[in-house]
Image (cartoon, helix red, strand yellow):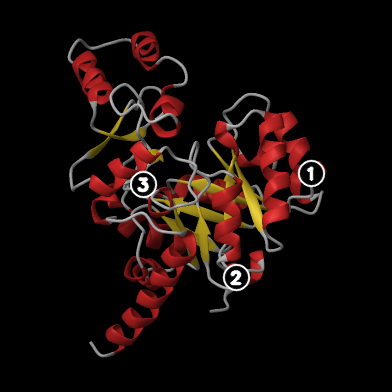
């Protein structure tokens, strides 16, 4: 299945396992890479030395390409970037910041750089910054998201129309059929997050994985736009946020309610009431927890079957 994405990363299938906080440790990333897609370690939930440990373990667990996802809004960014270089990581996905800040610095050190965007405007800025590819992430996605609520079905073709560099689709993709649909719309590959949360190798707590499996349509919603838009499972904490909104809260009041470490409490420690549970809308069709290799096989098999079916329409 060779194309611009497989050639860019040196992988067999044009699929990227998203670098998600508290879900994407070395076990998930190495399993994804060993399944012939691109695995990403999620640096957003790691102190610098913890990230170094995960990179070193990932290198021992796979001899295939893997990368690191770096949300640029987090502290210690310079230390994180230096560790990535020191450990010989060759692929970095950046997000939540200006791509001009680190792109050329990383590329000068032999690193391929991809930036995650949620709009045509930011896709063009990323291209102008010289990134090697962009991930265009639709409103359906879990975790932190775009304010404009542009869905993948509309975002992908609009971005494709404006850029020339490789395009990776994200948001609402968990199956081979969805992968085919986004590639028909112009994507060169896909980034998948939520489906890999419900994998054996995910570092998410078993309680959270079960929430993903049990989720139905309408169980998630985008909120906290005043801070950083995030799609959450509706739980006790989510309801507290909604109750606070009824009082026209200030940004400081929202920050006080959110507090610190709430995402870790929910996704990593398994507190399903007071934790922040980030997952995409597509969780409604995720019904099982499986090894990454099995998930990838299912996606590719369905992709090929769907291609044959579509050709007969």
Kindly indicate the quadrant of the structure image that contains residue 235. top left
Hey, which residue is sitting farthest bottom in the picture? 312
User: Which residue corresponds to mark 2?
Assistant: 6
Give the CA distance from mark 3 to mark 2. 23 Å
Residue sitting nearer the eye, 215 or 230: 215
Residue 2: x and y in percent read: 58, 78
Q: Which mark is residue 32?
A: none
In this view of the protein, can residue 148 be seen by the observer? yes
Quarter of the image where the C terminus is located = bottom left
Residue sitting nearer the eye, 50 or 152: 50
Crowding at label 2, few (<14), some or many (≥20) Cα neighbours within 10 Å? some
Residue sitting nearer the eye, 119 or 62: 62
Q: Quick check: marks 3 and 1 in contact, CB under 8 Å?
A: no
Compared to residue 3, the image places residue 23 above or below, namely above
Residue 183: x and y in percent read: 41, 70
Residue 161: x and y in percent read: 44, 63
Residue at x 67% of width, y 33% of height: 50
Q: Quick check: marks 2 and 1 in contact, CB under 8 Å?
A: no
Residue 262: x and y in percent read: 41, 22
Mark 3 and mark 2 lie on one chain; the one further toward the N terminus is: 2
| SS category of the residue bearing label 1 | helix
Mark 3 and mark 1 lie on one chain; the one further toward the N terminus is: 1
Left or right: 36 in relation to 100: left
Mark 2 and mark 1 lie on one chain; the one further toward the N terminus is: 2
Q: Which mark is residue 85?
A: 1
User: Which residue corresponds to mark 3?
Assistant: 141
Give the CA distance from mark 3 to mark 1. 29 Å
């Amino acid at each position: 299945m060779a194309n611009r994405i497989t050639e860019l990363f040196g992988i067999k299938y044009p699929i990227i396992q998203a670098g998600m906080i508290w879900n994407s440790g070395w076990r998930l990333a190495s399993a994804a890479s060993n399944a012939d897609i691109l695995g990403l370690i999620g640096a957003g939930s790691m102190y610098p030395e913890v990230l170094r440990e995960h990179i070193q373990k990932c290198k021992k667990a796979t001899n295939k390409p893997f990368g690191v996802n770096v949300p640029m809004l987090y502290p210690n960014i310079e230390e994180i970037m230096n560790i990535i270089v020191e450990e010989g990581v060759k692929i970095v996905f950046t997000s939540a910041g200006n791509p001009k800040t680190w792109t050329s610095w990383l590329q000068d050190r032999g690193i391929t750089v991809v930036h995650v965007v949620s709009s045509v405007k930011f896709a063009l800025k990323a291209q102008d910054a010289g990134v090697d590819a962009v991930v265009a992430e639709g409103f359906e996605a879990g975790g932190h998201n775009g304010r404009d609520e542009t869905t993948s079905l509309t975002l992908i073709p609009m971005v494709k129309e404006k850029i020339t560099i490789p395009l990776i689709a994200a948001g609402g993709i968990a199956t081979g059929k969805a992968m085919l649909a986004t590639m028909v719309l112009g994507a060169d590959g896909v980034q998948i997050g939520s489906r890999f949360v419900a994998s054996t190798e995910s570092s998410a707590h078993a309680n959270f994985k079960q929430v993903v499996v049990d989720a139905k349509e309408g169980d998630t919603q985008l909120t906290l736009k005043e801070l950083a838009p995030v799609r959450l499972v509706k739980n006790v904490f989510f309801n507290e946020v909604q109750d606070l909104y009824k009082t026209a809260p200030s940004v400081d009041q929202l920050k006080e309610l959110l507090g610190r470490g709430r995402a870790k409490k929910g996704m990593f420690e398994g507190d399903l009431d007071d934790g922040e549970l980030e997952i995409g809308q597509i969780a409604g069709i995720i019904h099982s927890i499986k090894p990454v290799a099995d998930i990838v096989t299912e996606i590719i098999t369905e992709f090929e079957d769907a291609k044959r079916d579509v050709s007969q329409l």
